[in-house]
Image (spheres, rainbow, N blue to C red):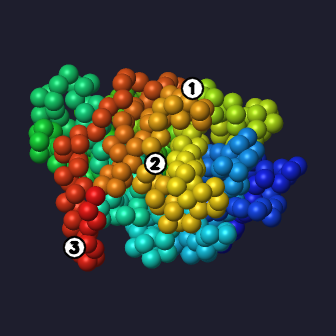
Amino acid sequence: MKFRTLFLGVVGAAVGVTGIAGVKAAFADEQFIPMLVYRTGPYAPSGIPVANGFRDYYTLVNKRDGGINGVKIAFEECETQYNTKLGVECYEKLKGKGQTGASLINPYSTGITYQLIPKAPVDKVPILSMGYGQTASADGRVFEWVFNFPTTYWSQASAFIKYVAHEEKGYDKLKGKKIVHIYHNSAYGKEANPTLEALAKRYGYKLTLLAVDHPGQEQKATWLQVRRLNPDWIFMSGWGVMNQVAVKEAGGINYPMEKFVGNWWSGTDADVKPAGTGAKGYKSATFHGAGSGFKVHADILKHVYGGDAAKAKENNIGEVLYNRGVVNAMFGVEAIRTAMGKFGNKAMTGEQVRWGLENLNLTKARLKELGMDGFTAPVKVSCADHETGGPVLFQQWDGNAWKVIGKPLSPMVDVVRPMIEKAAADYAKENKITPRSC
């Protein structure tokens, strides 16, 4: 297993650029954040920009701000290849490092998240599975140590149906429509199915579920079925090479791309560019802005890349999944800062960071201070609500760039929250957990 360590804050150390090693510094205080990454394997096209976004934001906080309230961030990458077994090994390798152990863990895999959920309360390491993982963990009464804000797979699926209803000019127009969900045949890919099935019963659309086996390079049989079904809409929960292949296959059968909508892990630059002009019009969900036109990008360019725009571009600045890594890293940093507001400006323990995550109140004003005004929505977490039900955006590929389209859509909370509470209650019963009183 390959490990790559970057410890930041050494004067003159060359950091923030792929392939240049960092040097560990002896700080009076360090906040250690492990990074589970996949820069290799079939999911590398998705994993690389995510990892670069995390790395660059941590570097930015150290260089621009001098750390989190003066406490430098130290982090270490561990290569998982998006493999659950390797991911758990990485977690075990990194959880005890740093002055106070791991601050929090971002598994960046639903499969790894599922395996780490029982470990979190034992190891006192909170999990931030931002927009992925086990959707039931949105109920903080049962899942005290797991957070999946700003929104979940079930909420996203409900927002997709809301979007389709808007495009079809009414919920009543959904009756009889044919909707296909093409999904990665894994815990991740299956997450949206319960919501899509529940809403099919409510609105009368005809749902077909088509699984694609790992890693997703072979999809001929899937798209033969799509051609036969001729669906009105396609929703996709893919990842890595699966997305590239699907977009190409859709273009190959001349499916109308404006009716093909990926989830927020199926809509980055690497997913559409290989298909060339055939990808034009493809859409996907998201929960943050597209492109590199936000102040945080200017700050990264200045402080991390020394103004070298070519090097920043080489490291994916402004790509969708790079931006997601930046947003995810920011959430973690601000949770640590929130914890420091209660426990003091020193390296926080995992238990203290858990409190910071649960009490995170990221306002519009604070986002503006961070250079993220308009980049992502405010977030306010609570004891019972670890999701927050943030708005879902939709974006479209115009052949050259992603553009956010339409207005943000709120999830169907009346459908999703009862499902979450039931699933959490079932989990609590099965695992003999007494839910907290919030």
* Relative to 240, 224 lies left or right: left
Reply above or below: 106 against 326: below
Q: Earlier in the sequence, mark 3 or mark 2?
A: 2
Of residue 217 and residue 14, the one placed in the foreground of this image is 14
Q: Position of residue 96 (x, y in %)?
A: 61, 74
Mark 3 touches mark 2? (CB < 8 Å): no
Residue sitting at the far right = 12
Of residue 406 and residue 410, the one placed in the foreground of this image is 410
Q: Name the residue under label 1.
A: 400
Mark 1 touches mark 3? (CB < 8 Å): no
Task: Tell me the quarter of the image containing the C terminus.
Answer: bottom left
Q: Which amino acid does label 2 sit on?
A: Leu
SS assignment at label 1: loop
Q: Which residue is drawn at 65% across and 45% down?
A: 57
Q: Name the residue under label 3.
A: 429
Q: Which of marks 2 and 1 is nearer the N terminus?
A: 2
SS assignment at label 2: loop
Q: Neighbour class for label 1 at 10 Å: few (<14), some, many (≥20)?
A: few
Q: Residue at x 76, y 38 (%)?
A: 303
Q: Neighbour class for label 3 at 10 Å: few (<14), some, many (≥20)?
A: few
SS assignment at label 3: helix
Q: Which residue is drawn at 18% across and 43% down?
A: 414
The answer to whether residue 121 is seen in the rendering is yes
Q: Position of residue 213 (x, y in %)?
A: 40, 60
